[in-house]
Amino acid sequence: MKWSKFNHLFCHENHFLLYNSLSNSFAELDSELYHQLSEFIIGKDVTIEDEELSENLRRMKALTNDDIQEIEKIKFTTLLNRFDNSRLSLTINPTLACNFSCPYCFEFEHANKTMSNEVEDRIVSFIKTKPSVKTLSITWFGGEPLLAFDRIESLTKKMLELGIQYNSGMISNGYLITKQKAEKFEKLHINSIQITLDGMEETHNKRRALKNGVGTFKRILESIEILTKYAPKTRINIRVNIDKENQSEYIKLHHFFSEKYKHKISITPAFTSDPTEKGTSCLYNQQERHDFIVKLFNEHNIFFNNFYPSNRRAECAIRNVGTYVIGPEGELYGCWNDVGNPNRVYGKLGDKTMDESKYIAYKMRADALTDTECNDCILFPVCNGGCPYDRIKRFEQGLKPSVCPLMKNSLDEYLTLHYKYKTQLLNKQKQKQN
């Protein structure tokens, strides 16, 4: 057995720790064992007389027969998922119209197009051309999808009649939720909804107002209350777009929702990007993003889910052959970041012609699986390659396509924060038991 190159053995703040990204395993060591393992060299044969220790290290994949074979297995599994035609995932934009005027949103300058009956029927016909599909997943997007709720109802009814396992979620600004709509969510299989709040009332209303300038904060809180009462099975996630102008607001919102709903509603920080490419000084760079999320934990005891990699090997869905983004006129896009941009359309439902180069680019271009720098990275087994949209965009600009996770350059610190968080949870459990 050999010492894996995907091991990360380190000492941080007097904690002796071993992380392996092949198994995504994490272990605390004593000082003696730490120094013993520190002698091992990557790729060299290792002999350990303690059979129990040897078995534990093999289970962690800290000891492996062949790192290359392990990487090939990861690539093979990834490609199997990428070309799995039993799953169909559609992002459907029933309208590009929106009642908000958020300055950072890509819909801001686009026409208010709404889906017709003809396009609705084309979507259903398109699904019928996929006989191997066993599961159908829909994301309702826009514009503001609730402006076309009748279209969501009629299209859902037709898709459910196909007899395919069905689920859906929605990205919404949350303003138009009513009791009547919420009561229909379960029947429409809307299992999750993401709603954006950019801070407490004063800050949010400056950033996410109606087109007439009226604030939306209080109405969105009413909508969330309606959902918890009349659509209790629908998971609610509050997204907070963060930049330097509202960085303290995430903390306030986190405490507000944690106290009011006792963690039944998730709240996620999301760093604002600049899709307009006009440039703005309020956005965080990589180091500033890192500093912000570390501060969340150290000063406010708020745990950020990016401290530790996910156990699930899953690329962004736009790499999958069964993923389509459908505009209100039946136009097809590679990614929902492109919706409304005519230059990024690669085809249209009902039209047999297709721009293959645009389509294939989203499936294969700037691929982390063939990127030697990615393959050599310790985080390759758990990274999933980062955002394909950003990778492809950078590649087309002649830049290195790498869009590395924040933890790459601060792995010791992130893993230590995860260790501290897990230790806190264990201590709380022990206190309850006592």
Image (spheres, rainbow, N blue to C red):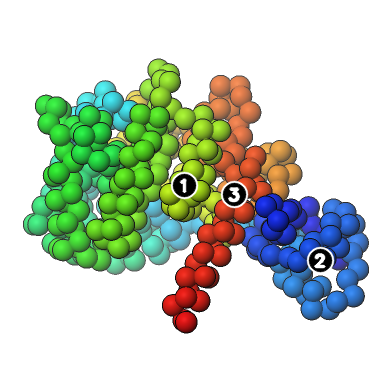
Badge 2: residue crowd in 10 Å (few <14, some 14–19, many ≥20) = few
The amino acid on which the numbered mark 2 sits, given as a three-letter code, is: Leu
Q: Residue 414 carries which label?
A: 3
Q: Quadrant of the N terminus?
A: bottom right
- Element at badge 2? helix
Extreme residue toward the left, this view: 180
- Element at badge 1? helix
- In which quarter of the view is residue 251 placed? top left
User: Which percent across, then down, holds residue 364?
Assistant: 57, 39
**Mark positioned earlier in the residue sequence (2 or 1):** 2
The residue pinned by badge 1 equals 299
Q: Are marks 3 and 1 in contact (CB under 8 Å)?
A: no
- Element at badge 3? helix
Q: Distance between the residues labelled 3 and 1?
A: 15 Å
Q: How far apart are marks 2 and 1 (CA)?
A: 32 Å
The amino acid on which the numbered mark 3 sits, given as a three-letter code, is: Tyr
The amino acid on which the numbered mark 1 sits, given as a three-letter code, is: Glu
The residue pinned by badge 2 equals 33
Residue sitting at x 73%, y 53%: 11
Which residue is at the front of the view, 352 or 43? 43
* Residue 311 visible in image: yes
Residue sitting at x 66%, y 48%: 412
Which residue is at the front of the view, 335 or 130? 335
Q: Is residue 48 above or below residue 142?
A: below
Q: Is residue 14 above or below residue 120?
A: below
